[in-house]
Amino acid sequence: MVIRSASPARVRTPASAKTTGTHRPPGAAGLDPRLLAVAGAASLSLTAIFTKLTDASTATIVFYRCLIAVVPLAFLAYAEVKRRGALPSRRTVAIQALGGAFLGIDFALFTQAIMLVGAGVSTILNNVQVLVVPLLAWAFFRDRIPLKFVAAVPVMFAGIAMAGGLVGGAPAPGADPLLGTLLGLASGVAYAGYIIIIGRTGSRSGPNCQVLISTAMAGIVGSVAGTAFGGIDFTPGWDAIGWLAALALVGQVLGWVLIGSALPRLKSQVGASMLLLQPVLAIVFAMLMIGERPTPLQLLGCVIVIGVVAAVSRAPKPKARSRRKTGIDPIEVIEQVE
């Protein structure tokens, strides 16, 4: 995972993805990157669905999600180290582990939000990190906050209130819409912290090593944080293990690999737009696979949130330069992910 600067916005994308439109990963030639991006977004959108189908405690889900994912990630990281011929430095490992701690908190809060407000809506709410990342970048690194971001904030929160079922008068689906909404938003804040921390490590290690380190730490911290909602069940049953394996391998490892292969070969605007399929598909899959039925007002709120994310995530257009001037400052847009 490589981020060199904080951009005005982020969509929730896998941790190993960087959009530059120049690099072509080995073995990716011949495959349409748009199809890879769609497949990756679809894989990621199933995360909340598999979580809901597992029917286990939050701590149990986070523990097994990370434990199972670590196995294939370890093989990918080993191949990466062998190819690069160097291990990441201790400082880099420490920074990535710190980022993984925030990711673990995100996992725990997001998992509990799914239980309380539903798989589809919680995925939408988690996108609050689009607003939090530039705020953190401004607070800690004095990055400039664009005017369109300021204008988007009230609209975003109006959409969040509608999507979470907090307005409209009619009872919203979910065990506890208010608490679920708050946890969904808090998980987005934690994920934003992960983005900021990992984004400042630069390219000091390969993406597979970074994902492995962050996932391992996320499993530790997320499992501990998840015990606030119930203990870890080390024998959840084979049905639960099956859904947990699907969550780890499809919703996490496969999604990250597909997105990581697609985004470097797409223009940043195209990649960002395709990644917006993730929350949309999460709503659709939740309705088709687990029978969630958001209210019309919630669906409208989801549309508003996705629209704001799309508007804020759009990369700025380079300003026209006079032909007499030489050199154009590069505009680096980073798209970052869960």
Image (tube, rainbow, N blue to C red):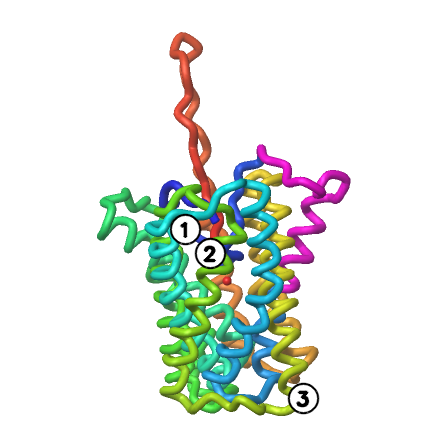
Query: From the viewer's perspective, is 83 left or right of 209?
Result: right
Query: From the viewer's perspective, is 255 left or right of 15?
Result: right
* Circles 2, 1 touching at the beta carbon (< 8 Å): yes
Foreground mark, 2 or 3?
3
Q: Residue furthest top?
A: 324
The span picked out in magenta is 22-43
Give residue 257's quadrant in the image: bottom right
From mark 1 to mark 3, how far is it between C-alphas? 40 Å
Residue of label 3: 238
Q: Secondary structure at mark 1?
A: loop
Give residue 255's quadrant in the image: bottom right
Q: Amino acid at mark 1?
A: Ala
Relative to the observer, which residue lies in front, 20 or 86?
86
The circle drawn on residue 309 is 2
Image x and y of residue 159, in percent: 43, 68
Q: Amino acid at mark 2?
A: Val
| Residue 159 appears anywhere in the view | no
Look at the image and say whether residue 291 sits in the magenta stretch.
no
